[in-house]
Image (cartoon, coloured by chain):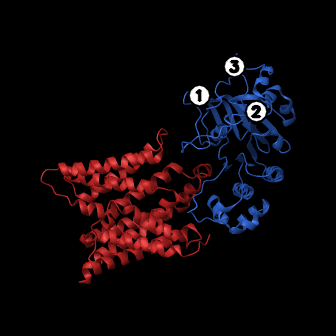
Chain colours: A blue, B red
């Protein structure tokens, strides 16, 4: 395996007295799609933001390859309606240059037809493709996508993930993908890291899918809460914080975060053995 | 007679020219309340100037710049929402300014001039300062245009793409503070935000790009200043409020126009 683009070791993050990330390791390498998967509030966005340098961890080491070019697709854009901004100008902001490059990038992601439209007026799927076009325009070494499939139907999601794999092949870049649904990203991803404040399990998607830790983490979405106690854990867990973990997607605004409580699994009194 | 109007006219035009593009950012970034707060701090600056015996406008500029930095720092905290914070700072400084002015023994400050502008009293020397300040602000905005715009679109994306986000944000705040300190002469503390917001809001419907919006806002601001001065001259009304009314009339005029994009 080639030299990592980013090597995160033993990353911990505390915020307002709560542990959001607990000694997480993550290596991102060129040409590999890594998917961070975990329930809402598991610290996925925080970890991605730390990898991007948008946030500082409380502890741990970060090694970035020198002159690393990163591209970032945030969960959503909040551009005020008062800003007259066409898709073309939006791309120009990332990479001023010849407009042919911008047209080519839009064609590559299949949205050349929205070039003159206002960014604020795009549908969810169009916006994701425009964001992807903007990211590949910069020819990044590492591309980070936070829940890219939100607001996109299943067909659109499959197409988007397929496109992502093509982009990886063309640019040879590393990709970090955040998702809360493994099934959707299964086909596109090379490696899965299952996160619930700490790394529960990691490996190929096939391996993770069968891992008891993964099953325990996601079973709660479909099984009534009192059935959950049957899942026993054979490794250290520290799940006493869910429900009111602060989100990382938006440090400037201070708003109620959309945690869903669907993952209310039953190991509040988790134990640790170090 | 008309030559008496020339310094006020040029002072107003210099301010409106910069208020256009700056106002566009105020609208895009929803900083109107922020501008208001800075303007209210200007009165505190005047009181400070009187207290330490330096001339008024340097003191106002200084206090506005310091307030901009303090507000940027205060906004980093997450306990209070921004508008709550600004609401407190804004009116505290306004009240403090008025109390401080009233405490100065033997000094009478024309509060009305501060609150509503004193454009007719500007001299050619003031015009030179305002023109210089306007040129400085405009050139810094143009030099940093792409960074400023990237910041406005998405700060995280800008930072990942290598834009010096914090420095750019501070630059924008300082330029805004500088403009407000200068513009107090034209429309005063209480009306300054309108000169920022109204031309930009009017320009929105006419513009297809951010640059067009900034340029059209500058143009509409110039028109409002000329029309306001003319109104004031004809009807003998206070200049600052007349300019604001003209700007409001311009906005109403653009409402009929369909949005371009």
Q: In which quarter of the image is the N terminus of chain A?
A: top right
User: B160 left or right of A126?
Assistant: left
How far, Cα to Cα, is label 2 from label 3? 18 Å
Kindly identify which residue carries mark 1. Answer: A18
Q: Which residue is drawn at 45% across and 62% down?
A: B140
Dot 2 or dot 1, earlier in sequence: 1
Q: Do labels 2 and 1 share a chain?
A: yes
How far, Cα to Cα, is label 3 from label 1? 15 Å
Dot 2 or dot 3, earlier in sequence: 2
Dot 3 or dot 1, earlier in sequence: 1
Q: How crowded is mark 3: few (under 14 residues within 10 Å), some or many (20 or more)?
A: few
Kindly identify which residue carries mark 2. Answer: A194
Judge by depth and name the residue closer to the eye, A140 or B243.
B243
How far, Cα to Cα, is label 2 from label 1? 20 Å
Q: In this view, does A58 lie above or below B183?
A: above
Is residue B114 among what the camera can see?
yes
Output the chain of dot 3: A
């Amino acid at each position: 395996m080639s030299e990592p683009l980013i090597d995160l070791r033993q990353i911990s993050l505390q915020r307002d007295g709560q542990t959001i990330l607990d000694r997480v390791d993550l290596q991102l390498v060129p040409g590999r799609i890594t998917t961070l998967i975990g329930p809402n509030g598991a610290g996925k966005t925080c970890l991605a933001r730390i990898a991007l340098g948008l946030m500082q961890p409380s502890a741990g080491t970060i090694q970035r390859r020198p002159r690393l070019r990163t591209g970032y697709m945030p969960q959503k854009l909040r551009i005020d309606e008062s800003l007259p901004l066409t898709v073309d100008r939006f791309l120009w902001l990332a990479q001023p240059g010849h407009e042919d490059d911008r047209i080519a990038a839009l064609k590559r992601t299949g949205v050349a037809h929205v070039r003159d439209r206002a960014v604020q007026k795009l549908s969810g799927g169009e916006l994701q493709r425009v964001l992807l076009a903007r990211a590949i325009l910069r020819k990044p070494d590492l591309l980070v996508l936070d829940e890219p499939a939100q607001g996109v139907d299943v067909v659109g999601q499959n197409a988007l993930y397929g496109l992502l794999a093509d982009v990886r092949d063309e640019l040879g870049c590393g990709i970090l993908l955040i998702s809360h649904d493994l099934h959707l990203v299964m086909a596109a991803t090379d490696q899965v890291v299952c996160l619930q404040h700490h790394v529960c399990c990691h490996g190929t998607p096939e391996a993770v899918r069968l891992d008891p830790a993964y099953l325990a983490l996601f079973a709660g979405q479909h099984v009534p809460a009192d059935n959950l106690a049957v899942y026993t854990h054979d490794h250290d867990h520290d799940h006493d914080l869910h429900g009111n973990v602060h989100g990382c997607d938006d440090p400037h605004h201070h708003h109620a975060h959309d945690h869903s409580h669907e993952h209310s699994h039953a190991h509040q009194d988790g134990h640790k053995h170090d | 007679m008309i030559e008496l109007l020339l310094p006020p006219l040029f002072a107003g035009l210099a301010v409106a020219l910069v208020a256009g593009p700056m106002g566009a950012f105020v609208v895009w970034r929803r900083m109107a309340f922020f501008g208001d707060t800075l303007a209210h701090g200007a009165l505190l600056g005047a009181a400070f100037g009187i207290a330490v015996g330096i001339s008024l406008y340097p003191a106002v500029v200084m206090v506005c710049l310091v307030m901009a930095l303090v507000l940027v720092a205060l906004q980093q905290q997450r306990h209070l929402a921004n508008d709550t914070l600004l609401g407190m700072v804004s009116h505290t400084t306004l009240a403090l300014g008025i109390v401080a002015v009233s405490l100065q023994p033997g000094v009478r400050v024309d509060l009305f001039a501060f609150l509503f502008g004193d454009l007719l009293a500007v001299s050619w020397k003031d015009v030179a300062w305002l023109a210089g300040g306007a040129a400085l602000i405009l050139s810094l905005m143009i030099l940093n245009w792409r960074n400023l715009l990237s910041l406005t679109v998405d700060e995280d994306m800008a930072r990942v793409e290598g834009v010096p986000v914090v420095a750019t944000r501070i630059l924008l705040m300082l330029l805004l503070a500088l403009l407000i300190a200068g513009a107090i002469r034209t429309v005063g503390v209480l009306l300054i935000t309108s000169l920022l917001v109204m031309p930009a809001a009017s320009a929105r419907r006419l513009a297809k790009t951010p640059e067009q919006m900034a340029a059209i806002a500058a143009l509409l601001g110039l028109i409002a200043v000329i029309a306001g001065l003319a109104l004031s001259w004809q009807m003998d009304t206070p200049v600052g409020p007349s300019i604001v009314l003209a700007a409001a009339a311009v906005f109403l005029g653009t409402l009929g126009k369909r949005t371009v994009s």
